[in-house]
Image (cartoon, rainbow, N blue to C red):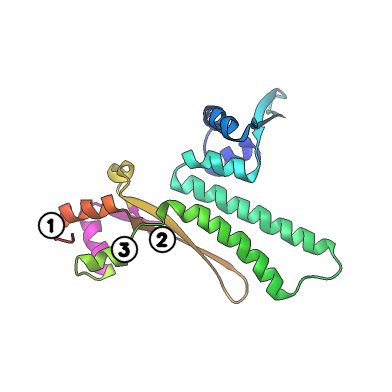
């Protein structure tokens, strides 16, 4: 994947992606002994400009500096590319694998992608778990936090208030499932860190520790 594709996918300016990669390249070279591959592209005026050509592992290394949403988009895009590659390879052979083998291959890709995507939220608590510490059900808990301006609902899921976003109170988790027809369903939801639990404890005034 090129740095141009990463910029388009994450909604960032290409020059900022290039600068982020340059800043992270020395550490990568120190550990791997390899530089990140530079390439070129032509802009709308025909000028030849630099860009990076990155492997999946290199992309995921760069993505550690992205926010949760941008990192999620990048991981899911790699998952799509790998799934497309499997389909292409299967179309090139005369005998397709058994359905169970296809599912096994898909599970490997999906499992690894979700593991990397959800790693930052591995030790966090769901709204349901946190609500129980305050003797609430999830519906009432979310309503109280919404009324207090701590969170708001957008795009089908809860989000932390913008003024609290940089305090590491929450992390985002992604859940992927499939219908019986093979249609993919992606659910993104907010979970609470221990700092978030302490913050809620101070705000709600309940002794949950």
| Real-space CA distance between mark 3 and mark 2, rounded to the nearest whole angstrom | 15 Å
Choose the circle earlier in sequence order: 3 or 2: 3
Residue 194, x across and y down, in percent:
28, 53
Q: Which residue is mark 2?
A: 156
The answer to whether marks 3 and 2 mark residues whose Cβ atoms lie closer than 8 Å is no
Which one is in front in this view, the residue at disc 3 or the one at disc 2?
3
**Which residue lies at the image location 66% right of the left edge and 42% below the top edge?**
55
Of the image marks 3 and 1, the number of the one nearer the N terminus: 3
User: Which residue is found at the position 62% from the left and 59% from the top?
Assistant: 109
Q: Residue at x 34, y 52 (%)?
A: 170
Residue 95 in the image: x percent, y percent? Answer: 84, 71
* Residue 148 on the magenta segment: yes
| CB within 8 Å, label 2 to label 1 | no
Q: Which one is in front, 9 or 133?
A: 133
Magenta stretch? 139-159
Q: Which residue is mark 3?
A: 127
Q: Among all residues in the image, which is located at the extreme top?
A: 47
Residue 14 in view in this figure: no
Which residue is nearer to you in this view: 98 or 29?
29
Return the residue at label 1.
205
């Amino acid at each position: 994947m090129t740095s141009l594709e990463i910029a388009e996918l994450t909604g960032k300016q290409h020059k900022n992606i290039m600068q982020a990669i340059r800043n992270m390249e020395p550490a990568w070279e120190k550990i791997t002994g390899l530089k990140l591959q530079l390439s070129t592209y032509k802009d709308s005026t025909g000028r030849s400009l630099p860009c990076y050509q990155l492997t999946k592992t290199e992309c995921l290394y760069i993505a550690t500096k992205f926010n949760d949403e941008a990192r999620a988009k990048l991981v899911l895009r790699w998952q799509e590319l790998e799934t497309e590659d499997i389909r292409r390879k299967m179309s090139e052979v005369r005998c397709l694998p058994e359905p169970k083998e296809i599912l096994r291959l898909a599970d490997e890709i999906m499992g690894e992608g979700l593991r990397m995507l959800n790693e930052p939220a591995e030790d966090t608590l769901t709204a349901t778990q946190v609500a129980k510490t305050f003797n609430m059900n999830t519906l009432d808990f979310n309503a109280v936090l919404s009324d207090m301006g701590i969170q708001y609902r957008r795009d089908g899921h809860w989000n932390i208030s913008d003024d609290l976003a940089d305090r590491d109170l929450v992390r985002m988790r992604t859940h992927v499932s499939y219908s019986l027809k093979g249609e993919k369903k992606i659910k993104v939801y907010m979970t609470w860190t221990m700092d978030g639990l302490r913050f809620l404890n101070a705000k709600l005034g309940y002794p949950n520790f």
